[in-house]
Image: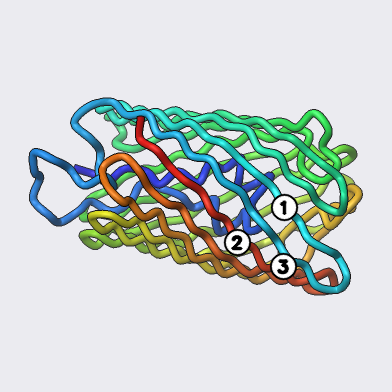
Amino acid sequence: MRAAVTYVALGVALALGAAAPAYADQSPAPEPSAAPTAQPWPTQPQNADTYDFEAGGTQSWLNSGRGVWHGAYANLFYAATSGFKAYGGALDTVRFGQNDPGYYAGVYVPTKNPNGTFNAEYGFSPTHYNIPASYWLANYDLRLADGFGVQAGYGNKAYTSENVPIWNAGFDKYFGNDRLAYRATFASISGTPGIGFSQTVTWNKTLPYDYVTVAANVGRDIENTGFNHVAFYTTAVVVLDDVHWLDQHTAFHADVNYNTLAGAYQRYEVLLGLRERL
C-alpha cells in the first residue's frame, strides 16, 4: 500500500513559499515496509475516503535591506481509496509592502496502463503585484519495476508583463520507507535571452507519525524580486519539512528553508501549519 501524498500544495510553493523548486517535488511517499494493519498509519492511505484541512502561515526574513515577507494559507485535500486526489486552497502573501491574495486547485489522477499518476494544477491572483497573475502545470509520474520511476512536466507562470515557461524531468527510487529523487528544471522568460537550469535532489522519509522531506536545489532560476522585476538569478535552496501527526486526526506541519539569490538577497523562511483530518 503506497503512502499518502504529503500535500505542500504547489500553489503555496509557487506563490507563497520561498523555495518553489524544492517544494515542487512533493510526490507520493515511499511504500511503507510495515505489514498492513486494521488501523493504517496516518501517513498511509486510509481505509475510507479522507478530507484533510490545513491552515497556517509563513514568515520570511530577507537581508540587504529588503525587509520581511509574511503570509497565510488554507488548503483542503481529498483522497479517495481509488488513489484519486483533489485539493484546493487560498493564500494571502505580503511582499515588499504589497498584498497579493491567490487561489489554486489541482488533481492527482492514477492511471493503470501505463502505471502512474497524472497531476494538473491551476492558480491565479487578482492583484499579482509580486506573484503570478496565473499559472498552470501538468506532470506525469510513470512507475517502473523495482521501485523506480520517471517524471516529466510542463508549466507556465504569467506575470504582469512576462511569461515564464517551465519544463522539468527527473527520476526517483523507493527504498522501503524512503524515497530519493532527482529533478532537472529548465525555464525561460519571454523577451529575455537565455535558459535557466536548476537541479533538485529530494529525500523523503515515511514514519508512522511523520513524513519528512529534505531537499536541496542549485542552479540558475527565475524570481520576481519586487515590483515585477522578473529575472534570472543564480540560486541555492535548502528545505527541511515535516508533517508530524499527534494522532489519527491532527498533525502539525513545520518547514524551514534557506534561499540565496546571487546579487539580490538571502531569504530565511519558516512555515507553521495545523492539519485536521475531518
Query: Residue 106 shows which numbered tag?
Result: none
Q: Secondary structure at mark 1?
A: strand
Mark 1 against mark 3, which lies toward the viewer?
A: 1
* Quadrant assignment, res 160: top right
Q: Is residue 159 among the parts visible in the rendering?
A: yes
> Nearer the viewer's eye, disc 2 or disc 3?
2
Residue to which mark 2 is pinned: 270
Q: Amino acid at mark 1?
A: His
Residue under the image location 21 percent in, 60 percent down: 176
- The residue that label 1 is drawn on is 70
- Sequence-wise first label, 2 or 1: 1
Residues under numbered marks 2 and 1 in contact, where contact means CB atoms less than 8 Å apart: no
Which quadrant of the structure image shows residue 10? top right
The answer to which of 4 and 221 lies nearer the viewer is 4
> Which dot marks residue 267?
3
Q: Amino acid at mark 3?
A: Arg
Q: Give the secondary structure at mark 2.
A: strand
Q: Is residue 150 left or right of residue 264?
A: left
Q: Is residue 189 above or below residue 52?
A: below
The picture places residue 124, in percent across and down from the top left corner, at 71, 31
Residue at screen point 63% across, 69% down:
258
Q: Is residue 267 left or right of residue 7?
A: right
* Kind of residue at badge 2: Val
Q: In the rendered view of the protein, which quadrant contains the C terminus?
A: top left
The x and y percentages for residue 78 are 39, 28
Residue 100 image position (x, y, % from top left): 78, 39
Q: Secondary structure at mark 3?
A: strand
The quarter in which the N terminus is drawn is top left
